[in-house]
Image: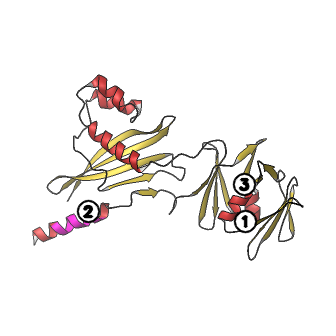
Amino acid sequence: MRRIFTSLVIAILLFSIQLPRTTFADSEEAPIVIDTGKIVNGRTLIPIRVVSEKFGFKVQWDQNLKTVVISDKTTKITLKVNSKEATINENKVSLDVPAQIHKGTTYVPLKFLSHAFGASVEWNQSFKVAHVTFEKINILIYTQIKPIPLVTDEQFKTFSQIANEAAVITDIRQAKAYFKPYFTDKLLGNIIWYKGLPFDTQFDAEKNSMITYKDIYNSEATISQSTHFVSLVWLTRTMQLTFTDEGWKIQKIDFKYLYL
């Protein structure tokens, strides 16, 4: 009976840690990313066509009148280039700055999304990005700073392998050069000082591994891995990643026991 119970617990554990490879902290799905926003004279401008179409609206351009018409079954929005006035279902609305064209794309002030669609708009000064929420749709509109790229599958495997190799350091001089592209200076210094990591256990990137992102901007990520250590004991390794000017790097590695 005990043997059956133990087998059942192990099966439940294995099932519970077989998580999706990638998850996002603040949303059910990855947000839609648009990197063509602009800041002009201190005002945040967004490309109205692409945003409207992501919301499910139809967009038409009248070349003669220089107007944009955005519509669905219940709403009709009309914008005229170089005008601070727009209409929403025949009701006039004032814009902070006029609709304008940049390289063939019509831009409107960010605040207009709240008036026109009832969308929620938040501005993140650190990343120079507008987070727009409409119904269940999340859109990130970047202006001056490019979006942080997700960790690729190849990078995921590389970080796992690098952490395995850093378990034991035998040649300090070679290790400093070899590991520098993958670890922050502080973490690498600690690894060199202690001549490796607390455990020399090897983890398989293809099994019991996942990656999560701290926030919707993907500013930090965590790789979590589990492996069978000894009888009825599993070992978990978490690697906290940060995005630097040189790309993604591991800034912290933790280990924990999981007992059955």
What residue would you read off at disc 2? 14
Count of numbered tags? 3
Classify 10 Å Cα crowding around label 3: few (below 14), some (14-19), many (20 and above). Answer: many
SS class, disc 2: helix
Query: How far apart are the two marked residues, 3 and 2, measured between alpha carbons?
Result: 46 Å
| Residue extending furthest toward the top | 173
Most foreground residue, 210 or 6 = 210
Badge 1: how crowded within 10 Å, few (<14), some, or many (20+)? some
Q: Amino acid at mark 2?
A: Leu
Seen in the image, is 117 located left or right of residue 238? Answer: right
Is residue 214 or residue 40 the one in the foreground?
40
The vertical placement of 165 against 99, above or below, is above
Q: Is 12 a magenta residue?
A: yes
Q: Which residues are magenta?
A: 7-15
Q: Which residue is mark 3?
A: 47
From the top left corner, tell me how far across and down residue 79 is, in percent. Answer: 83, 61
- Disc ID at residue 117: 1
Q: Amino acid at mark 3?
A: Pro
Q: Position of residue 150 (x, y in %)?
A: 48, 49
Label 1 vs label 2: CA separation? 45 Å
Quarter of the image for the C terminus: give it: bottom left
Whether the residues at callouts 1 and 2 have beta carbons within 8 Å, the answer is no
Which secondary structure type mostly characterizes the magenta part of the structure? helix
Q: CA distance from mark 3 to mark 1?
A: 15 Å
Residue 71's image quarter? bottom right
The dot on residue 235 is none
Q: Which is more toward the observer, 49 or 239?
A: 49
